[in-house]
Amino acid sequence: MQVSVEKTGDLERRMTVQVPGDDITSKVNSRLSELRRQVRLKGFRPGKVPLNVVRQRYGKQVREEVLGQVMESSLQEAIGQEEMRVAGVSRLEPASGPDFEGDFEFIAELEVFPEMPEIEIADLAFERPVAEVADSDVDDMIDTLRQQRREWETVERPAAMDDRVRLTYVADAEGERVPEVGHHELAPTLGNMTTFPQLEEALTGMSAGESKEVELTFPEDYRYQALAGKTAKVELSVQEVQASEMPEVDDAFADSFGVDGGVEQLRADVRRNLERELRQAVTNRLKTAVTDALSEKYADLALPRSSVTQEARQMVQQMQQQSGQQADLPLEQFMPMAERRLRLGLLMGELARQNEISIDQGRVQQKLEEVADTYEDPSQIIEIYRADKNLMDQLENLVLEEQVIDLVLDKAEVADKTMSFKEALET
């Protein structure tokens, strides 16, 4: 087999492969002989059909099948012979005519992955968040849990701070009634409306059965697009005012969350969960910083279009699965993120290769236990992961990625930055 490769672009190649004609003839004859033992033709006993009859009837079809198989297998052999990292094949077709004599020649147009440079990371600089979970952070989470355990009761008085107000409303936005028919419903808690203070002010002091017309400017991210970011006249109608008392933090409160050991154990569990959340937040911050820096430094790294397109298609499929909808999404919208993902995948993989990083199975086990610890029955989750190769592959890839991040941080210039727990969790 003879192979020649022509460079037709930065990552485009045209490969010409020549296969000895004797190989083609041998394969065709072998296939016809096999077919002769299988075919049944009127006038001939099974397995006794003359070869020339089989060739006359099936020769063209068999030859086409053999040529297709030869192109596929010879292409893979040629790719290995030339040590090419192929991203995709855009065209594969014979160069020889259908009635060729002698050697068989075909052409493949390919895209290859770029030659990776030596990844330099010593000149990168990062800030590493340094934070810890304080007692006040535990207190705040306990208060959040108390909020979740509040029981609401209707009260016959004007709405005040910490009350929940059930209301209906109709808005007139630029001459359009929202909603067109009926009304929208809300049940906000006063004192907890940082994104919509105008509405909180309007509701304070209102009682059940009372209505009021006010002018409100809705937040940009308001859930109804017809009102988001707009100023409108709004008719508010309060249906009910509810008040609640925060439960005491005692052993019964801890028990309501399934915690054995009372308040002390509840606080210990809360602290452990917050510390896990903090570790993940710091990891994510560092990962974002490192990947941003690598993406910017190697932004000129050429990428095969076919691989970018494939990555974008996968992103579209993931979004469709998550939303439960099969609506057509414009592929071009996902191309920039697909390019980033592919570029980072190549860079991270090359960093691992250049620095001979292999997956640390100890860290994989630690990561698995950390994931499982967030569930009620950790041992069951560990069994599920161990029995599912795809889940374990995902976990191993995550660990390898973290090992590469650690390598970058070890070789780059890193300055610690002290911050609070809440600051560390901010994105």
Image (cartoon, grey):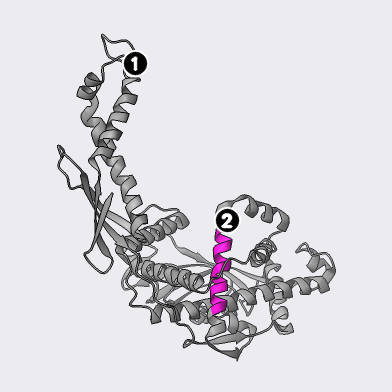
Given residues 178 and 246, the one toward you in this image is 246
User: Residue at left 26%, top 40%?
Assistant: 67
Instruction: Tell which circle, 1 or 2, labels the residue nearer the N-terminal end.
Output: 1
Q: Position of residue 205 (x, y in %)?
A: 58, 79
Q: Quadrant of residue 411?
A: bottom right
Question: Is 84 drawn above or below residue 217 in the view shown?
Answer: above
Q: Position of residue 7 (x, y in %)?
A: 23, 65
Q: Is residue 231 left or right of residue 255?
A: left
Q: Of the numbered discs in the image, which one, if any, rests on residue 391? A: 2
Q: Is residue 188 left or right of residue 140?
A: left
**Amino acid type, callout 1:** Gly
Q: Which residues are magenta?
A: 391-407
- Which numbered disc, 1 or 2, marks the residue closer to the eye? 1
Res 170 seen here? no
Q: Position of residue 102 (x, y in %)?
A: 18, 41
- Other residues around mark 1 within 10 Å, as few (<14) / some (14–19) / many (≥20): some
Q: Main secondary structure of the magenta part?
A: helix
Circle 1: element type: loop
Please say whether residue 398 is one of the residues in the magenta stretch: yes
Q: Of the numbered discs in the image, which one, if any, rests on residue 47? A: 1
Given residues 342 and 272, the one toward you in this image is 342
Q: Of the numbered discs in the image, which one, if any, rests on residue 302? A: none
**Amino acid type, callout 2:** Leu
Q: Quadrant of residue 418?
A: bottom right
Please say whether residue 415 is one of the residues in the magenta stretch: no
Q: Position of residue 384 (x, y in %)?
A: 65, 52
User: Residue at left 73%, top 80%?
Assistant: 139
Disc 1/disc 2 C-alpha distance (Å): 51 Å
Circle 2: element type: helix
